Amino acid sequence: MLKLVHIIERFGTAGPERSILAAAKYAARAGLHHEHTVCPLTCAISPLALALARQSGVKVLRTPAAAARAEVLTGADIVIAHFWNNPALYGWLRSALPPMRLMVWLKIFGSHRPQVIPSPLYAFADLLVATSPGTLTLPGFAVQAPSTPVVFGLADFDRLANFAPQPHTGFVVGYVGGLGPGKVHPEFVAMSAAVCKPSARFVVCGSGAWQPLQQQAQALGATERFDYRGYVESIGRTLAEFDLFGYPLSPETYATSEKALQEAMWVGLPPVVFSHGGVRYLVEDGVTGRVVESAGAYTSAIEHLCQAPAERAHLGANAREYARATFDPLRGVRQLTELYKQLMESPKRERQWPADGHTPAEWFAASLGDQGGAFARSLRGPDGAAEAEIAAASDLLFSGEGGIAHYHNTYPDDPHLRFWASLVRQQRRQHAIG
């Protein structure tokens, strides 16, 4: 029995967690003897995720206590750290760790701060695995790219068993995904409302604050065209209502292999996406969907496909064929199994994260790598130019995962984090007044 232990910030129902569950489920289906244990680093554990874990045969350590986790890590054959920038994961990297074989599975594209890939990670991990081929093209990845495998995050397509499109009124463009900062395109509502087809309506499913989107729709007089449903677990029934999958992500997205997009393509829904993050490596323009570069082009693509059922059917059939060849979870399990075999050829080893400061603010600045210059300068003393750059932080850098607010909320007593957060809030208040 190969003992695999997963280190992850939380245990909910988002993409990284579902990938763990799918890996366990399909490994068992393939007759592989893998034991999966998840060690969340925080208390953020979803009851639904626990129920899904039981169904998949995955154990979950339900305490973030370091002593309990150390015992599990010591008994592991391989430890898999699911990486994105967050205070808890960096705290784990800096902690005293037992000897282990460590695979780091990147769950970020890596191009936009705060979700960047720190250079010390290359030597710290025994094996670094990307989830998008685009990550290997990043300038900072040039040396590492030839030896870095790419394994898409696994989806459980049993959720789509017996899928059949359902009759409905109008033309439905669906979105399934997070609604938080840095995820959905900032012009999502405006460019959707601009579609000049009265029967077109937009169903929005996903966790996060949907009220700002509703307010934007109200300001445009388009409230009736949008249907906000929040998080949905019955993804098959939801996709069955869609005619088109509109998946416009933010220019700063750190998305990689996107389960929602995989699922939509799996059932033959043609997607319309932007060429941001890892999404452009999943959809081929004019073949398996449409890839656009601007808000106007997104609106035009939706309008055109609304009125072109034959083209929609053609793109959808191609998307379905591509998805079933590329995203087959058994294929992903085989890829992972080969990587496990490679890791097991070497003994466990000790490792230590290089010194990256003594305060939470210093840790945050270090997590941004060569994109953390303004924060590093601010740490040295008053610097008007650095403070102006920090004040103009993007939504992702300020309020996204691993951003200023995330670190400040985790370490509320750190004076620099408090100062940086106040700079951004003050600038935004001034813009709102102006």
Image (tube, rainbow, N blue to C red):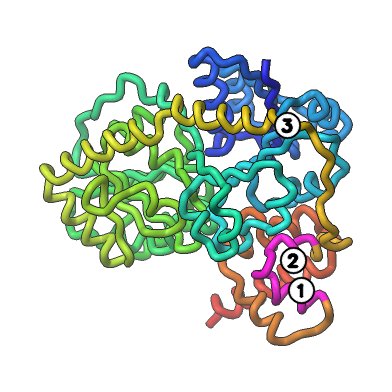
Q: Is residue 70 visible?
A: yes
Q: Is residue 221 visible?
A: no
Residue labelled with disc 1: 376
Residue labelled with disc 2: 365
The mark that comes first in sequence, 2 or 3, is 3
The mark that comes first in sequence, 1 or 2, is 2
Label 2 element class: helix
CB within 8 Å, label 1 to label 2? yes
Q: Where's residue 169, x and y in %?
A: 19, 38
Which label belongs to residue 39? 3
Image side of residue 201 versus residue 78, left or right: left
Label 3 element class: strand
Q: Where's residue 272, x and y in %?
A: 30, 51
Camera-side residue: 247 or 189?
Answer: 247
- In magenta stretch: residue 377: yes
Q: Where's residue 363, x and y in %?
A: 79, 60
Highlighted range, magenta: 363-379
Residue at 58% across, 30% down: 20
